[in-house]
Image (cartoon, rainbow, N blue to C red):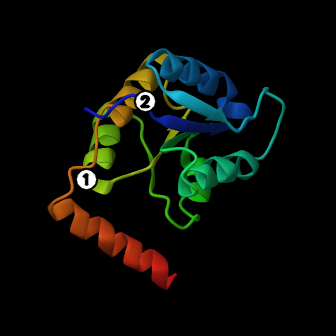
Amino acid sequence: MEQTKKTIAFACDHGGYILKDAILAHVRDKGYDVLDFGTDSTARCEYPDHGEPACRAVVAGKADLAILVCGTGIGMSLIANKIHGIRAACCSEPYSAKMTRCHNDANVLCIGARVVGEGPALDIVDAFLDHAFEGGRHAERVARIMEVEKRG
């Protein structure tokens, strides 16, 4: 289990706003600090405008991890993975969320508000936050991923 006094960056688009706020409250209740990069309503907006700053906070060391929410989670994962140093995974169930932390050292979790409901989303978040990178043979694989990123 990871220590719980970390800072989590949050972002969403209009499709993820309601679920993002529920997750944000849940994470605060667990003792995490949060940075909220919006959006702050269900008014139409563009997910890259919110997802990018949240990911840049992770890369800059202002946040330890990020949680991004849009309709499917896919758009947010696409924008997140364009940013050097980000390893984002779109997860729809807890096992994948756990494994992406343990084996891939993912630093961004993406969730689809139109894919999972609030209860399952909170379970996914807990699985992501409650586990740490295992290192070992997985560290070699993550290093290879980062080499590919460097080559562009």
The residue shown at (60%, 24%) is: 19
Which labelled disc corresponds to residue 5?
Answer: 2
C-alpha span from label 2 to label 1: 22 Å
Task: Please give the residue where the numbered disc 1 appears in the rendered image.
Answer: 103
Q: Quadrant of residue 94?
A: top left
Q: Considering only vertical position in the picture, is 39 above or below 48?
A: above
Spot occupied by residue 14 in the image (x, y as percentages of width and height): 74, 33
Spot occupied by residue 152 in the image (x, y as percentages of width and height): 52, 81
Q: Find out whether the residues at labels 2 and 1 contact each other: C-beta distance under 8 Å.
A: no
In-front residue for pair 124/112: 124
Q: Considering only vertical position in the picture, is 83 above or below 38?
A: below
| Relative horizontal placement of residue 49, taking residue 24 as reference (left or right) | right
In-front residue for pair 31/11: 31
Q: Residues within 10 Å of mark 1 (few under 14, many from 20)?
A: some
Mark 2: which secondary structure? loop
Q: Amino acid at mark 1?
A: His
The residue shown at (62%, 57%) is: 79
